[in-house]
Amino acid sequence: MRGHDWINTLLPDELLIEIFRRLDSKSNRDASSLVCTRWLRLERLTRAAIRIGASGSPDLLIHLLAARFSNITTVHIDERLSVSIPAHLGRRRSSGNSSVKLHDVNDKHGSASDQSDLDSLCLSDSGLASLAEGFPKLEKLRLIWCSNVTSEGLSSLARKCTSLKSLDLQGCYVGDQGLAAIGQCCKQLEDLNLRFCEGLTDNGLVELALGVGNALKSLGVAACAKITDVSMEVVGSQCRSLETLSLDSEFIHNKGVLAVIKGCPHLKVLKLQCINLTDDTLNVAGTSCLSLELLALYSFQRFTDNDKGLEVIATGCKELTHLEVNGCHNIGTLGLESVGKSCQHLSELALLYCQRIGDAGLVQVGQGCKFLQALQLVDCSSIGDEAMCGIASGCRNLKKLHIRRCYEIGNKGIIAVGEKCKLLTDLSIRFCDRVGDRALIAIAEGCSLHYLNVSGCHLIGDAGVIAIARGCPQLCYLDVSVLQKLGDIAMAELGEHCPLLKEIVLSHCRQITDVGLAHLVKGCCTVLESCHMVYCSGVTSVGVATVVSSCPNIKKVLVEKWKVSQRTQRRVGSVISYLCMDL
Protein backbone atom coordinates (compact mmCIF):
# COMPACT_ATOMS: atom_id res chain seq x y z
CA MET A 1 0.00 0.00 0.00
CA ARG A 2 3.03 2.29 0.15
CA GLY A 3 2.28 5.44 -1.80
CA HIS A 4 -1.37 4.49 -2.31
CA ASP A 5 -4.33 5.17 -0.04
CA TRP A 6 -6.39 2.19 -1.14
CA ILE A 7 -8.54 2.16 2.02
CA ASN A 8 -9.82 5.73 1.77
CA THR A 9 -10.14 5.40 -2.00
CA LEU A 10 -12.17 2.20 -2.05
CA LEU A 11 -14.06 1.94 1.24
CA PRO A 12 -17.27 3.96 1.75
CA ASP A 13 -18.05 5.78 5.00
CA GLU A 14 -20.59 3.19 6.11
CA LEU A 15 -18.07 0.33 5.95
CA LEU A 16 -15.36 2.23 7.80
CA ILE A 17 -17.85 3.16 10.52
CA GLU A 18 -18.78 -0.50 10.94
CA ILE A 19 -15.09 -1.42 11.19
CA PHE A 20 -14.52 1.20 13.90
CA ARG A 21 -17.52 -0.12 15.84
CA ARG A 22 -15.99 -3.59 15.90
CA LEU A 23 -12.65 -2.50 17.37
CA ASP A 24 -12.21 -4.24 20.72
CA SER A 25 -10.95 -1.39 22.89
CA LYS A 26 -11.17 2.36 23.33
CA SER A 27 -7.39 2.70 22.92
CA ASN A 28 -7.55 1.08 19.47
CA ARG A 29 -10.40 3.36 18.45
CA ASP A 30 -8.50 6.40 19.70
CA ALA A 31 -5.43 5.36 17.73
CA SER A 32 -7.45 4.83 14.57
CA SER A 33 -8.98 8.28 14.83
CA LEU A 34 -5.50 9.82 14.59
CA VAL A 35 -4.74 8.33 11.15
CA CYS A 36 -6.38 11.09 9.13
CA THR A 37 -9.15 13.69 9.34
CA ARG A 38 -11.64 11.40 7.60
CA TRP A 39 -11.07 8.60 10.11
CA LEU A 40 -11.35 11.09 12.96
CA ARG A 41 -14.70 12.32 11.65
CA LEU A 42 -16.06 8.82 11.06
CA GLU A 43 -14.79 7.39 14.33
CA ARG A 44 -16.58 10.16 16.22
CA LEU A 45 -19.83 9.00 14.63
CA THR A 46 -19.41 5.58 16.27
CA ARG A 47 -19.25 6.96 19.81
CA ALA A 48 -22.52 6.28 21.63
CA ALA A 49 -21.51 6.93 25.25
CA ILE A 50 -19.43 9.44 27.20
CA ARG A 51 -18.44 9.52 30.87
CA ILE A 52 -17.60 12.85 32.51
CA GLY A 53 -16.21 13.63 35.93
CA ALA A 54 -16.17 16.98 37.64
CA SER A 55 -13.95 19.36 35.68
CA GLY A 56 -12.75 22.93 35.66
CA SER A 57 -15.50 24.00 33.27
CA PRO A 58 -18.11 21.23 32.98
CA ASP A 59 -20.57 23.37 31.03
CA LEU A 60 -17.93 24.25 28.44
CA LEU A 61 -16.77 20.64 28.28
CA ILE A 62 -20.27 19.44 27.46
CA HIS A 63 -20.58 22.11 24.77
CA LEU A 64 -17.31 20.95 23.16
CA LEU A 65 -18.28 17.27 23.33
CA ALA A 66 -21.67 17.94 21.80
CA ALA A 67 -20.00 19.68 18.86
CA ARG A 68 -17.77 16.65 18.20
CA PHE A 69 -19.93 13.61 18.92
CA SER A 70 -23.36 13.76 17.29
CA ASN A 71 -24.61 10.21 17.91
CA ILE A 72 -24.32 10.06 21.70
CA THR A 73 -27.18 8.17 23.37
CA THR A 74 -25.66 7.64 26.85
CA VAL A 75 -24.15 10.28 29.14
CA HIS A 76 -22.77 9.62 32.63
CA ILE A 77 -21.79 12.66 34.72
CA ASP A 78 -20.46 11.89 38.20
CA GLU A 79 -19.14 14.78 40.26
CA ARG A 80 -17.57 12.37 42.73
CA LEU A 81 -14.95 11.48 40.12
CA SER A 82 -11.54 13.11 40.12
CA VAL A 83 -11.47 16.86 39.55
CA SER A 84 -9.01 18.67 37.31
CA ILE A 85 -8.49 21.71 39.51
CA PRO A 86 -7.27 24.96 37.91
CA ALA A 87 -3.62 25.72 38.52
CA HIS A 88 -4.33 28.67 40.84
CA LEU A 89 -5.71 26.21 43.41
CA GLY A 90 -2.32 24.58 43.54
CA ARG A 91 -3.48 21.04 43.04
CA ARG A 92 -2.37 20.34 39.51
CA ARG A 93 1.11 18.99 39.00
CA SER A 94 2.46 18.96 35.51
CA SER A 95 5.65 16.93 36.01
CA GLY A 96 5.65 13.62 34.23
CA ASN A 97 2.99 11.88 32.18
CA SER A 98 2.29 8.90 34.40
CA SER A 99 -1.03 8.55 36.22
CA VAL A 100 0.09 6.37 39.12
CA LYS A 101 -0.75 7.66 42.58
CA LEU A 102 1.00 7.20 45.90
CA HIS A 103 -1.64 8.15 48.45
CA ASP A 104 -1.02 10.17 51.57
CA VAL A 105 -2.61 9.13 54.85
CA ASN A 106 -2.07 12.51 56.51
CA ASP A 107 -3.59 15.33 54.39
CA LYS A 108 -7.17 15.39 55.64
CA HIS A 109 -8.75 18.76 54.93
CA GLY A 110 -8.83 21.38 52.21
CA SER A 111 -9.29 25.08 52.92
CA ALA A 112 -12.62 26.88 52.92
CA SER A 113 -11.58 28.89 49.87
CA ASP A 114 -10.79 25.67 48.00
CA GLN A 115 -14.28 24.40 48.79
CA SER A 116 -15.81 27.62 47.49
CA ASP A 117 -13.87 27.22 44.25
CA LEU A 118 -14.94 23.59 43.98
CA ASP A 119 -18.60 24.62 44.21
CA SER A 120 -18.15 26.64 41.03
CA LEU A 121 -16.87 23.59 39.18
CA CYS A 122 -20.19 21.73 39.28
CA LEU A 123 -22.52 21.15 36.37
CA SER A 124 -25.17 23.86 36.15
CA ASP A 125 -28.61 24.18 34.56
CA SER A 126 -26.90 25.94 31.67
CA GLY A 127 -24.66 22.92 31.14
CA LEU A 128 -27.65 20.61 31.24
CA ALA A 129 -29.38 22.75 28.65
CA SER A 130 -26.28 22.50 26.42
CA LEU A 131 -26.36 18.75 26.90
CA ALA A 132 -29.99 18.62 25.80
CA GLU A 133 -29.26 20.77 22.73
CA GLY A 134 -26.16 18.81 21.75
CA PHE A 135 -27.43 15.28 22.34
CA PRO A 136 -31.06 15.16 21.15
CA LYS A 137 -30.80 11.37 20.66
CA LEU A 138 -30.10 10.88 24.37
CA GLU A 139 -31.64 7.71 25.82
CA LYS A 140 -29.73 7.21 29.07
CA LEU A 141 -28.57 9.94 31.46
CA ARG A 142 -26.89 9.59 34.84
CA LEU A 143 -26.39 12.75 36.91
CA ILE A 144 -24.63 11.59 40.06
CA TRP A 145 -24.37 14.15 42.88
CA CYS A 146 -24.72 17.07 40.49
CA SER A 147 -25.85 19.35 43.30
CA ASN A 148 -26.21 22.54 41.26
CA VAL A 149 -28.75 21.09 38.81
CA THR A 150 -32.32 22.23 39.52
CA SER A 151 -35.78 21.71 38.07
CA GLU A 152 -35.10 24.41 35.49
CA GLY A 153 -32.28 22.42 33.92
CA LEU A 154 -34.22 19.16 34.13
CA SER A 155 -37.21 20.76 32.43
CA SER A 156 -35.10 22.01 29.52
CA LEU A 157 -33.65 18.52 29.17
CA ALA A 158 -37.10 16.94 29.16
CA ARG A 159 -38.32 19.20 26.35
CA LYS A 160 -35.36 18.38 24.08
CA CYS A 161 -34.61 14.73 24.90
CA THR A 162 -38.01 13.14 24.44
CA SER A 163 -36.49 9.72 23.69
CA LEU A 164 -35.04 9.44 27.19
CA LYS A 165 -35.45 5.91 28.59
CA SER A 166 -33.23 5.90 31.68
CA LEU A 167 -32.64 8.71 34.20
CA ASP A 168 -30.49 8.54 37.33
CA LEU A 169 -30.70 11.61 39.57
CA GLN A 170 -28.84 10.27 42.59
CA GLY A 171 -27.89 13.08 44.94
CA CYS A 172 -29.37 15.83 42.74
CA TYR A 173 -31.44 18.51 44.49
CA VAL A 174 -34.14 18.75 41.83
CA GLY A 175 -37.71 19.63 42.62
CA ASP A 176 -41.18 18.45 41.68
CA GLN A 177 -41.42 20.70 38.61
CA GLY A 178 -38.45 19.03 36.94
CA LEU A 179 -39.76 15.52 37.59
CA ALA A 180 -43.21 16.51 36.35
CA ALA A 181 -41.65 17.81 33.12
CA ILE A 182 -39.94 14.46 32.62
CA GLY A 183 -43.32 12.75 33.01
CA GLN A 184 -44.96 15.10 30.52
CA CYS A 185 -42.28 14.94 27.81
CA CYS A 186 -40.40 11.64 28.16
CA LYS A 187 -43.12 9.11 27.54
CA GLN A 188 -40.64 6.29 26.90
CA LEU A 189 -38.97 6.52 30.32
CA GLU A 190 -38.35 3.02 31.68
CA ASP A 191 -35.78 3.43 34.45
CA LEU A 192 -35.76 6.11 37.18
CA ASN A 193 -33.44 6.41 40.18
CA LEU A 194 -34.32 8.98 42.85
CA ARG A 195 -31.85 8.04 45.58
CA PHE A 196 -31.01 10.97 47.88
CA CYS A 197 -33.16 13.44 45.94
CA GLU A 198 -34.12 15.46 49.02
CA GLY A 199 -35.97 18.17 47.14
CA LEU A 200 -38.72 15.87 45.82
CA THR A 201 -42.17 15.31 47.30
CA ASP A 202 -45.12 13.08 46.47
CA ASN A 203 -46.35 15.68 43.98
CA GLY A 204 -43.40 15.24 41.65
CA LEU A 205 -43.49 11.44 41.66
CA VAL A 206 -47.26 11.40 41.20
CA GLU A 207 -47.00 13.66 38.13
CA LEU A 208 -44.24 11.48 36.69
CA ALA A 209 -46.20 8.26 37.24
CA LEU A 210 -49.27 9.77 35.61
CA GLY A 211 -47.16 10.91 32.67
CA VAL A 212 -45.08 7.82 31.85
CA GLY A 213 -47.59 5.23 33.04
CA ASN A 214 -46.91 1.68 31.91
CA ALA A 215 -43.60 2.63 30.26
CA LEU A 216 -41.87 2.71 33.66
CA LYS A 217 -40.15 -0.59 34.49
CA SER A 218 -37.70 0.32 37.25
CA LEU A 219 -37.98 2.74 40.19
CA GLY A 220 -35.54 3.43 43.00
CA VAL A 221 -36.28 5.73 45.96
CA ALA A 222 -34.01 6.29 48.95
CA ALA A 223 -33.71 8.99 51.61
CA CYS A 224 -36.52 11.08 50.15
CA ALA A 225 -38.32 12.20 53.30
CA LYS A 226 -41.30 13.72 51.48
CA ILE A 227 -42.08 10.72 49.30
CA THR A 228 -44.68 8.62 51.13
CA ASP A 229 -47.42 6.05 50.63
CA VAL A 230 -49.40 8.61 48.62
CA SER A 231 -47.10 8.48 45.59
CA MET A 232 -46.49 4.74 45.98
CA GLU A 233 -50.22 4.12 45.61
CA VAL A 234 -50.24 6.08 42.35
CA VAL A 235 -47.23 4.13 41.08
CA GLY A 236 -49.08 0.92 41.86
CA SER A 237 -52.16 2.00 39.92
CA GLN A 238 -50.47 3.72 36.95
CA CYS A 239 -47.19 1.82 36.39
CA ARG A 240 -48.44 -1.74 36.06
CA SER A 241 -45.47 -2.81 33.92
CA LEU A 242 -43.03 -2.08 36.77
CA GLU A 243 -40.45 -4.87 37.09
CA THR A 244 -37.96 -3.42 39.62
CA LEU A 245 -38.71 -1.60 42.86
CA SER A 246 -36.01 -0.46 45.30
CA LEU A 247 -37.16 1.41 48.42
CA ASP A 248 -35.11 2.73 51.34
CA SER A 249 -37.35 4.91 53.47
CA GLU A 250 -38.59 5.56 56.98
CA PHE A 251 -41.70 7.25 55.60
CA ILE A 252 -43.17 4.48 53.47
CA HIS A 253 -45.41 1.93 55.19
CA ASN A 254 -47.34 -1.21 54.32
CA LYS A 255 -50.03 0.74 52.48
CA GLY A 256 -47.68 2.11 49.82
CA VAL A 257 -45.59 -1.02 49.31
CA LEU A 258 -48.61 -3.32 49.14
CA ALA A 259 -50.22 -1.03 46.55
CA VAL A 260 -47.20 -1.53 44.28
CA ILE A 261 -46.95 -5.27 44.96
CA LYS A 262 -50.63 -5.83 44.19
CA GLY A 263 -50.78 -3.42 41.27
CA CYS A 264 -47.61 -4.51 39.48
CA PRO A 265 -47.91 -8.24 38.70
CA HIS A 266 -44.70 -8.29 36.65
CA LEU A 267 -42.35 -7.40 39.52
CA LYS A 268 -39.07 -9.31 39.18
CA VAL A 269 -36.80 -7.35 41.54
CA LEU A 270 -37.86 -6.19 45.01
CA LYS A 271 -35.39 -4.46 47.36
CA LEU A 272 -36.82 -3.18 50.61
CA GLN A 273 -35.24 -1.24 53.46
CA CYS A 274 -38.31 0.23 55.12
CA ILE A 275 -38.35 -0.08 58.90
CA ASN A 276 -42.12 0.38 59.14
CA LEU A 277 -43.08 -2.69 57.09
CA THR A 278 -44.70 -5.64 58.83
CA ASP A 279 -45.40 -9.32 58.16
CA ASP A 280 -48.06 -8.51 55.56
CA THR A 281 -45.43 -7.36 53.05
CA LEU A 282 -43.79 -10.76 52.61
CA ASN A 283 -47.09 -12.63 52.83
CA VAL A 284 -48.65 -10.58 50.02
CA ALA A 285 -45.45 -10.61 47.93
CA GLY A 286 -45.34 -14.40 48.11
CA THR A 287 -48.85 -14.68 46.69
CA SER A 288 -48.77 -11.74 44.25
CA CYS A 289 -45.22 -11.55 42.85
CA LEU A 290 -45.09 -14.93 41.13
CA SER A 291 -42.42 -13.72 38.67
CA LEU A 292 -40.08 -12.48 41.41
CA GLU A 293 -36.42 -13.28 40.66
CA LEU A 294 -34.52 -11.11 43.17
CA LEU A 295 -35.51 -10.30 46.75
CA ALA A 296 -33.40 -8.18 49.11
CA LEU A 297 -34.57 -7.53 52.67
CA TYR A 298 -32.76 -5.04 54.90
CA SER A 299 -33.30 -4.44 58.62
CA PHE A 300 -36.85 -5.71 58.99
CA GLN A 301 -37.22 -5.09 62.72
CA ARG A 302 -41.00 -4.94 63.01
CA PHE A 303 -41.62 -8.39 61.58
CA THR A 304 -42.89 -10.82 64.19
CA ASP A 305 -42.51 -14.04 62.18
CA ASN A 306 -39.94 -13.60 59.41
CA ASP A 307 -39.59 -17.36 59.00
CA LYS A 308 -43.26 -17.65 58.01
CA GLY A 309 -42.96 -14.75 55.58
CA LEU A 310 -39.88 -16.23 53.95
CA GLU A 311 -41.69 -19.57 53.67
CA VAL A 312 -44.53 -17.86 51.78
CA ILE A 313 -41.99 -16.23 49.45
CA ALA A 314 -40.19 -19.53 48.87
CA THR A 315 -43.32 -21.51 48.08
CA GLY A 316 -44.92 -18.82 45.92
CA CYS A 317 -41.95 -17.35 44.04
CA LYS A 318 -40.62 -20.38 42.22
CA GLU A 319 -38.48 -18.26 39.86
CA LEU A 320 -36.40 -16.74 42.67
CA THR A 321 -32.70 -16.74 41.73
CA HIS A 322 -31.21 -14.10 44.06
CA LEU A 323 -31.90 -13.69 47.77
CA GLU A 324 -30.26 -11.24 50.19
CA VAL A 325 -31.19 -11.10 53.87
CA ASN A 326 -29.40 -8.28 55.68
CA GLY A 327 -29.88 -7.46 59.33
CA CYS A 328 -33.27 -9.18 59.64
CA HIS A 329 -32.76 -10.58 63.12
CA ASN A 330 -36.07 -12.43 63.25
CA ILE A 331 -35.28 -14.62 60.24
CA GLY A 332 -33.94 -17.96 61.43
CA THR A 333 -33.03 -21.43 60.31
CA LEU A 334 -36.59 -22.48 59.43
CA GLY A 335 -37.00 -19.62 56.96
CA LEU A 336 -33.82 -20.53 55.11
CA GLU A 337 -34.78 -24.21 55.10
CA SER A 338 -37.95 -23.24 53.23
CA VAL A 339 -35.81 -21.51 50.60
CA GLY A 340 -33.65 -24.62 50.25
CA LYS A 341 -36.69 -26.83 49.77
CA SER A 342 -38.61 -24.66 47.29
CA CYS A 343 -36.22 -22.35 45.38
CA GLN A 344 -34.46 -24.79 43.09
CA HIS A 345 -33.27 -22.06 40.72
CA LEU A 346 -31.47 -20.04 43.40
CA SER A 347 -28.07 -18.94 42.07
CA GLU A 348 -27.00 -16.23 44.56
CA LEU A 349 -27.52 -16.12 48.33
CA ALA A 350 -26.31 -13.42 50.75
CA LEU A 351 -26.84 -13.64 54.52
CA LEU A 352 -25.59 -10.65 56.49
CA TYR A 353 -25.90 -10.22 60.25
CA CYS A 354 -28.29 -13.14 60.55
CA GLN A 355 -27.54 -14.46 64.02
CA ARG A 356 -30.49 -16.87 64.19
CA ILE A 357 -29.67 -18.83 61.03
CA GLY A 358 -27.83 -22.04 61.82
CA ASP A 359 -26.12 -24.85 59.96
CA ALA A 360 -29.33 -26.73 59.12
CA GLY A 361 -30.56 -23.88 56.92
CA LEU A 362 -27.50 -23.91 54.69
CA VAL A 363 -27.39 -27.71 54.66
CA GLN A 364 -30.91 -27.63 53.19
CA VAL A 365 -29.78 -25.02 50.63
CA GLY A 366 -26.98 -27.39 49.65
CA GLN A 367 -29.47 -30.20 49.15
CA GLY A 368 -32.05 -28.22 47.20
CA CYS A 369 -30.23 -25.41 45.36
CA LYS A 370 -27.93 -27.26 42.99
CA PHE A 371 -27.44 -24.19 40.77
CA LEU A 372 -26.05 -21.93 43.51
CA GLN A 373 -23.06 -20.00 42.13
CA ALA A 374 -22.45 -17.28 44.73
CA LEU A 375 -22.66 -17.33 48.53
CA GLN A 376 -21.93 -14.44 50.90
CA LEU A 377 -21.90 -14.78 54.69
CA VAL A 378 -21.20 -11.84 57.01
CA ASP A 379 -21.35 -11.96 60.82
CA CYS A 380 -23.44 -15.12 60.94
CA SER A 381 -22.27 -16.44 64.28
CA SER A 382 -24.33 -19.65 64.22
CA ILE A 383 -23.04 -20.90 60.87
CA GLY A 384 -20.06 -23.26 60.98
CA ASP A 385 -18.25 -26.09 59.26
CA GLU A 386 -21.32 -28.33 58.98
CA ALA A 387 -23.03 -25.70 56.85
CA MET A 388 -20.01 -25.28 54.58
CA CYS A 389 -19.68 -29.04 54.14
CA GLY A 390 -23.35 -29.17 53.14
CA ILE A 391 -22.88 -26.38 50.59
CA ALA A 392 -19.74 -28.05 49.19
CA SER A 393 -21.49 -31.39 48.80
CA GLY A 394 -24.54 -30.08 46.99
CA CYS A 395 -23.49 -26.88 45.21
CA ARG A 396 -20.81 -28.08 42.81
CA ASN A 397 -21.39 -25.03 40.56
CA LEU A 398 -20.21 -22.59 43.25
CA LYS A 399 -17.96 -19.93 41.70
CA LYS A 400 -17.91 -17.21 44.35
CA LEU A 401 -17.66 -17.59 48.13
CA HIS A 402 -17.30 -14.57 50.44
CA ILE A 403 -17.16 -15.06 54.22
CA ARG A 404 -16.45 -12.40 56.84
CA ARG A 405 -16.34 -12.71 60.61
CA CYS A 406 -18.03 -16.11 60.75
CA TYR A 407 -15.96 -17.44 63.63
CA GLU A 408 -17.39 -20.97 63.65
CA ILE A 409 -16.15 -21.67 60.12
CA GLY A 410 -12.70 -23.27 60.10
CA ASN A 411 -10.40 -25.49 58.09
CA LYS A 412 -12.88 -28.38 57.81
CA GLY A 413 -15.52 -26.36 55.94
CA ILE A 414 -13.10 -24.62 53.57
CA ILE A 415 -11.26 -27.88 52.85
CA ALA A 416 -14.59 -29.40 51.78
CA VAL A 417 -15.13 -26.48 49.41
CA GLY A 418 -11.67 -26.99 47.92
CA GLU A 419 -12.26 -30.67 47.39
CA LYS A 420 -15.72 -30.44 45.80
CA CYS A 421 -16.27 -26.97 44.30
CA LYS A 422 -13.89 -27.18 41.35
CA LEU A 423 -15.39 -24.15 39.59
CA LEU A 424 -14.58 -21.74 42.42
CA THR A 425 -12.62 -18.71 41.15
CA ASP A 426 -13.48 -15.99 43.69
CA LEU A 427 -12.78 -16.63 47.39
CA SER A 428 -12.83 -14.15 50.26
CA ILE A 429 -12.36 -15.34 53.85
CA ARG A 430 -11.85 -12.29 56.05
CA PHE A 431 -11.23 -12.32 59.78
CA CYS A 432 -12.13 -15.98 60.22
CA ASP A 433 -9.67 -16.92 62.93
CA ARG A 434 -10.14 -20.68 62.60
CA VAL A 435 -9.06 -20.82 58.95
CA GLY A 436 -5.38 -21.65 58.41
CA ASP A 437 -2.84 -22.97 55.93
CA ARG A 438 -4.51 -26.37 55.53
CA ALA A 439 -7.60 -24.72 54.10
CA LEU A 440 -5.62 -22.75 51.51
CA ILE A 441 -3.63 -25.83 50.52
CA ALA A 442 -6.89 -27.67 49.77
CA ILE A 443 -8.23 -24.69 47.80
CA ALA A 444 -5.01 -24.52 45.77
CA GLU A 445 -5.22 -28.22 44.95
CA GLY A 446 -8.85 -28.14 43.85
CA CYS A 447 -9.61 -24.65 42.48
CA SER A 448 -8.07 -22.20 40.03
CA LEU A 449 -8.63 -18.90 41.81
CA HIS A 450 -8.59 -15.50 40.11
CA TYR A 451 -9.46 -13.54 43.28
CA LEU A 452 -8.41 -14.28 46.86
CA ASN A 453 -8.85 -12.25 50.05
CA VAL A 454 -7.71 -13.78 53.36
CA SER A 455 -7.29 -10.52 55.26
CA GLY A 456 -7.15 -10.95 59.03
CA CYS A 457 -6.99 -14.78 59.07
CA HIS A 458 -4.06 -14.83 61.49
CA LEU A 459 -3.46 -18.60 61.26
CA ILE A 460 -2.48 -18.30 57.59
CA GLY A 461 1.24 -18.03 56.86
CA ASP A 462 3.77 -18.77 54.16
CA ALA A 463 2.69 -22.39 53.59
CA GLY A 464 -0.87 -21.48 52.59
CA VAL A 465 0.05 -18.58 50.33
CA ILE A 466 2.85 -20.58 48.70
CA ALA A 467 0.33 -23.31 47.88
CA ILE A 468 -1.97 -20.71 46.32
CA ALA A 469 0.91 -19.28 44.28
CA ARG A 470 1.82 -22.68 42.88
CA GLY A 471 -1.73 -23.92 42.35
CA CYS A 472 -3.47 -20.77 41.06
CA PRO A 473 -1.40 -19.27 38.21
CA GLN A 474 -4.45 -17.28 37.01
CA LEU A 475 -4.54 -15.23 40.22
CA CYS A 476 -5.19 -11.54 39.48
CA TYR A 477 -6.07 -10.13 42.93
CA LEU A 478 -4.66 -11.00 46.34
CA ASP A 479 -5.33 -9.44 49.77
CA VAL A 480 -3.16 -10.87 52.55
CA SER A 481 -3.29 -7.85 54.84
CA VAL A 482 -2.93 -8.29 58.60
CA LEU A 483 -1.23 -11.70 58.25
CA GLN A 484 1.52 -11.56 60.84
CA LYS A 485 3.04 -14.91 59.84
CA LEU A 486 3.49 -14.03 56.19
CA GLY A 487 7.02 -13.30 54.97
CA ASP A 488 9.32 -12.87 52.02
CA ILE A 489 9.30 -16.53 50.96
CA ALA A 490 5.63 -16.29 50.00
CA MET A 491 6.33 -13.08 48.06
CA ALA A 492 9.04 -14.82 46.05
CA GLU A 493 6.67 -17.68 45.19
CA LEU A 494 3.97 -15.25 44.09
CA GLY A 495 6.45 -13.44 41.87
CA GLU A 496 7.56 -16.70 40.29
CA HIS A 497 4.22 -18.43 39.76
CA CYS A 498 1.55 -15.68 39.40
CA PRO A 499 2.46 -13.66 36.29
CA LEU A 500 -1.07 -12.23 35.95
CA LEU A 501 -1.22 -10.62 39.41
CA LYS A 502 -2.53 -7.05 39.00
CA GLU A 503 -3.47 -6.03 42.54
CA ILE A 504 -1.96 -7.00 45.87
CA VAL A 505 -2.70 -5.78 49.39
CA LEU A 506 0.10 -6.34 51.93
CA SER A 507 -0.79 -3.75 54.58
CA HIS A 508 0.07 -4.62 58.21
CA CYS A 509 2.25 -7.58 57.17
CA ARG A 510 5.21 -6.90 59.44
CA GLN A 511 7.48 -9.70 58.24
CA ILE A 512 7.51 -8.65 54.59
CA THR A 513 10.63 -6.67 53.68
CA ASP A 514 12.20 -4.93 50.72
CA VAL A 515 13.72 -8.28 49.70
CA GLY A 516 10.29 -9.87 49.38
CA LEU A 517 8.98 -6.94 47.34
CA ALA A 518 11.92 -7.23 44.96
CA HIS A 519 11.15 -10.92 44.34
CA LEU A 520 7.44 -10.16 43.94
CA VAL A 521 7.81 -7.49 41.27
CA LYS A 522 10.49 -9.46 39.44
CA GLY A 523 7.81 -11.84 38.19
CA CYS A 524 4.72 -9.62 38.21
CA CYS A 525 6.31 -6.36 37.09
CA THR A 526 4.71 -6.19 33.65
CA VAL A 527 1.11 -6.41 34.85
CA LEU A 528 1.09 -5.17 38.47
CA GLU A 529 -1.16 -2.10 38.74
CA SER A 530 -1.83 -1.66 42.46
CA CYS A 531 0.16 -2.36 45.62
CA HIS A 532 -0.98 -1.48 49.15
CA MET A 533 1.74 -1.76 51.80
CA VAL A 534 0.80 0.58 54.62
CA TYR A 535 2.30 -0.23 58.03
CA CYS A 536 4.67 -2.91 56.77
CA SER A 537 7.51 -2.21 59.21
CA GLY A 538 10.02 -4.19 57.14
CA VAL A 539 9.42 -2.10 54.02
CA THR A 540 11.55 1.02 53.53
CA SER A 541 11.92 3.68 50.87
CA VAL A 542 14.06 1.21 48.94
CA GLY A 543 11.15 -1.22 48.61
CA VAL A 544 8.79 1.56 47.54
CA ALA A 545 11.25 2.69 44.88
CA THR A 546 11.63 -0.89 43.66
CA VAL A 547 7.90 -1.31 43.14
CA VAL A 548 7.41 2.03 41.41
CA SER A 549 10.45 1.79 39.15
CA SER A 550 10.08 -1.89 38.21
CA CYS A 551 6.39 -1.93 37.26
CA PRO A 552 5.62 0.13 34.12
CA ASN A 553 1.85 -0.29 34.50
CA ILE A 554 1.64 0.56 38.20
CA LYS A 555 -1.23 2.97 38.88
CA LYS A 556 -1.60 3.06 42.63
CA VAL A 557 0.78 2.54 45.55
CA LEU A 558 -0.54 3.05 49.06
CA VAL A 559 2.23 3.71 51.59
CA GLU A 560 3.26 6.10 54.35
CA LYS A 561 4.49 9.41 53.00
CA TRP A 562 7.80 9.29 54.86
CA LYS A 563 8.77 6.13 52.98
CA VAL A 564 8.82 7.95 49.65
CA SER A 565 12.30 9.30 49.05
CA GLN A 566 12.94 12.59 47.29
CA ARG A 567 14.69 10.70 44.52
CA THR A 568 11.60 8.55 43.94
CA GLN A 569 9.44 11.67 43.90
CA ARG A 570 11.67 13.35 41.33
CA ARG A 571 11.87 10.23 39.21
CA VAL A 572 8.17 9.50 38.91
CA GLY A 573 6.90 13.09 38.90
CA SER A 574 3.09 13.15 38.89
CA VAL A 575 3.07 9.48 39.87
CA ILE A 576 3.25 10.68 43.47
CA SER A 577 0.19 12.11 45.12
CA TYR A 578 -1.30 11.43 48.50
CA LEU A 579 -4.68 10.13 49.57
CA CYS A 580 -6.60 11.45 52.57
CA MET A 581 -7.61 8.37 54.50
CA ASP A 582 -7.50 6.74 57.90
CA LEU A 583 -6.03 3.30 58.37
Image (tube, grey):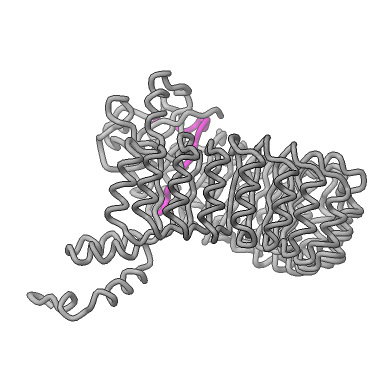
- Residue drawn where x is 68% and y is 50% of the image: 246
- Side (left or right) of 380 relative to 166: right
- Side (left or right) of 114 relative to 453: left
Q: Main secondary structure of the magenta part?
A: loop
- Residue drawn where x is 67% and y is 63% of the image: 241
**Location of residue 115 with respect to 549 vertically, above or below:** above
At which x and y percent is residue 521? 41, 48
Q: Which residues are magenta?
A: 527-541
At which x and y percent is residue 235? 69, 53
Residue 96 in magenta?
no
- Side (left or right) of 425 relative to 106: right
Q: Is residue 466 visible?
A: yes
Q: Is residue 407 visible?
A: no
Nearer-the-camera pick, 67 or 514: 67
**Location of residue 379 with respect to 75 vertically, above or below:** above
Nearer-the-camera pick, 113 or 4: 113
Q: Quadrant of the image for the C terminus?
A: top right
At which x and y percent is residue 424? 65, 62
- Side (left or right) of 275 relative to 147: right
